[in-house]
Image (cartoon, rainbow, N blue to C red):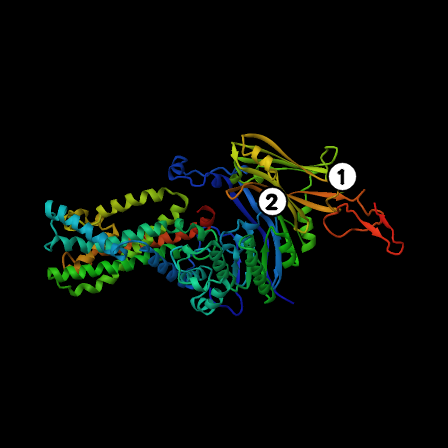
Amino acid sequence: MSKTAIRVENLGKKYNIGALVVKYPTLRDKISDGFKRHEKNADNFIWALKDVSFEVKEGQVLGVVGRNGAGKSTLLKILSRVTEPTEGLVEIRGRVGSLLEVGTGFHPELTGRENIFLNGAILGMRREEIGSKFDEIVSFAEVEKFIDTPVKRYSSGMYLRLAFAVAAHLEPEILVVDEVLAVGDAEFQKKCLGKMSDVAQQGRTVLFVSHNMSAVLRLTQETLVIDHGQLLMRGPTPEAVDFYLSKGLTQEGQKIWMEDEIATAAKPFRPIAIRVLDKHGGVADTVRSAEPFVIEIEYELGKPLKGLRVGIYLLTTRGEYIFTSFDTDDIKQYEANTVRQAGRYVSRCKIPANLLNEGRYVIGVNASTYLIKRYFQDDQALLFNVDPVGAPGMQWVETRLGTIRPVLNWQIENYESGEMRHGK
Amino acid sequence: MSAMNEPRTITIKPSTGWAALNLKDLWDYRELIYFFTWRDLKVRYKQTLLGASWAVLQPVLTMVVFSIFFGGLAKVPSDGVPYPIFSYTALLPWTLFSKALQDASRSLVSSANIISKVYFPRLILPISSTLAGLVDFAIAFVVLLLMMVFYGIHPTANLWLLPLLILLALITAIGVSLWLSALNVMYRDVGHMLPFLNQFWMYITPIAYSSSIVPEKWRFVYALNPLTGVVEGFRWALLGTGEGPGITLLISSCIAILITISGLFYFRRMERKFADLV
């Protein structure tokens, strides 16, 4: 039926860590090293991508999921020709447009009108092409009134809408989308998702990279799971998402962060581990719905931090949020912990009995100061199971719908006898 | 970049050794050269008090200082024409060259955010930075015409050489900045070196003085600086001083072309690393 739009074969990309850490070697270093070739040390480089092969058919919408640093961005950069692979081959039929460069080349001093033309040209549109789509872009971005105002006077929302509008009207044969949906207000996000579905329905190929599992589930039929630069699996999206969320994340109910998983921007916050503890205080990957359990986060502060809050997100494996909670939500805790001194900490959260239904859940971690800085975030830190033993309704062997399973007080009245009986 | 009915297939694979120049790609993206040049022009004098007068002020004020100290006090010979116009004629192509060199050498690093996100032939950046200088040149040229009227100097029939000389100045600027901009991506030393290089180069170019003071036997070495040929040519074409295009201009042109061709290959070789290093 359809032809191959993207063919990737044994793709690999090697980064020299030395060059990343000492970002700019000076000419003097080079001279004092006598221009000698550095010995190839095995520790000196990492493979951001290794032996990745896959094909995408024309008109297919393919999801790409993976943790931070898994190699997703590297893959997209190679596909959009920003950087060259170290080995392997990619064949692409048609023009690649990507929404990962929303607003690239926008100049603050230029007006909206001028930036549409400049940005369009940078993205590879021709002048007539931009001209013919100009009105459409402006009305999509809803900036008609400000089109001759320098974009530095735009609100961040307007700026983003305009930037997205230009990229979205590029109409390439292949569209690459990376996390644009993380920005903008809910209304605009809806619009972006709508635009993406349009693009897919017009028979164009879309590569959709996201941490938002519900968006991936909604927009794609097939998904690639990438981890540590390797393609772990490709399959129907629901299976791939479940695999991604459960894959190796449960290490007997605890997750210990390795040094390379923590961005340098997290400093002075250093996450150590997150665990699920059952009611006896043991680390467990399965807890009972009818019993309370504890989620604890262990971390270290390199220096005192003011206003820090450490918290969790609880999500379903479909990526829907159940709740968010921080250790200083309580006003007394908040006032008692305005400044946390350097040192090692554990933030412990007790989850009451009879809250969650049976199933699998994902815990995300966030350490931040409100409106100032997000030190650390891991959206899929740990996965655990909830067992229904002892929960209400277990006399029937069936899977209950819903994410929560509270114990509720029911009353059953019999009008004929006129008496009221209380249900237990 | 062109609208395609039948999408063409692009193959991406690691390149080895010296890359082909791939000037066709550059041609496909020619509109982007226009847009970058246009952006540089639009933005250059935004939020300034004096606006485009800066294009004139720079060479004019330099000329005034030169005229007072070199022409007036040090009595530097000026080949029989008034010293102000003698130095201004040289300052015109020099300002064009030096501005282009400064902007183009920094062009890759200052566009780091675009380079790390979008593909386009990177050659476009130094080229469009260089071209943006032409408008300033044109404005400053008007002042020269006024000065010629004031001093009663009639342009000679040698004017035909002028466009070629401007081209030579631009080619030299592009050639040198191809090397420097690519080096700047890896070694930020280039940024520190530029002001010094600029000053140094100005002294070895016959701007404040006439090249006739250079001893005959050193003329050959002196002509290795392509700007010598440009400046001498400008004075010959506009003021009728010195000699017409000869061996000096030939040497200058050859050097400029050599620098540019080697720069093109070096730039293309380094291009694949730009996005990772910048």
Which residue is farthest right? A417
Q: Is residue B111 left or right of residue B83?
A: right
Front position among marks 2 and 1: 1
Q: Give the camera-side residue of A192 and A80.
A: A192
Q: Are marks 2 and 1 in contact (CB under 8 Å)?
A: no
Which residue is farthest front? A418
Label 2 to label 1: alpha-carbon separation: 37 Å
The residue that appears at 55% across and 37% down in the rendered structure is: A308
Q: Is residue B140 left or right of residue A112?
A: left
Q: Quadrant of the N terminus of chain A?
A: bottom right
Question: Quick check: do tags 2 and 1 share a chain?
Answer: yes
Rendered image: mark on residue A228: 2
Question: Dot 1 surroundings within 10 Å: few (below 14), some, or many (20 or more)?
Answer: some
Q: Is residue B95 above or below residue A291?
A: below
Which residue, given by chain and number where applicable, does mark 1 sit on? Answer: A291
Rendered image: mark on residue B57: none
Picture coordinates of residue B273, whole percent (x, y): 46, 48
Picture coordinates of residue B226, whole percent (x, y): 25, 52
Q: Give the camera-side residue of B122 and B224.
A: B122
Picture coordinates of residue B68, whole percent (x, y): 13, 47
Q: Indicate the amino acid at tag 2.
A: His
Q: Indicate the amino acid at tag 1.
A: Glu
Picture coordinates of residue A64, whole percent (x, y): 61, 53
Q: Chain of mark 2?
A: A
Q: Give the camera-side residue of A279 and A60.
A: A279
Q: Chain of mark 1?
A: A
Q: Quadrant of the C terminus of chain A?
A: top right
The residue that appears at 55% across and 36% down in the rendered structure is: A269
Question: Dot 2 surroundings within 10 Å: few (below 14), some, or many (20 or more)?
Answer: some
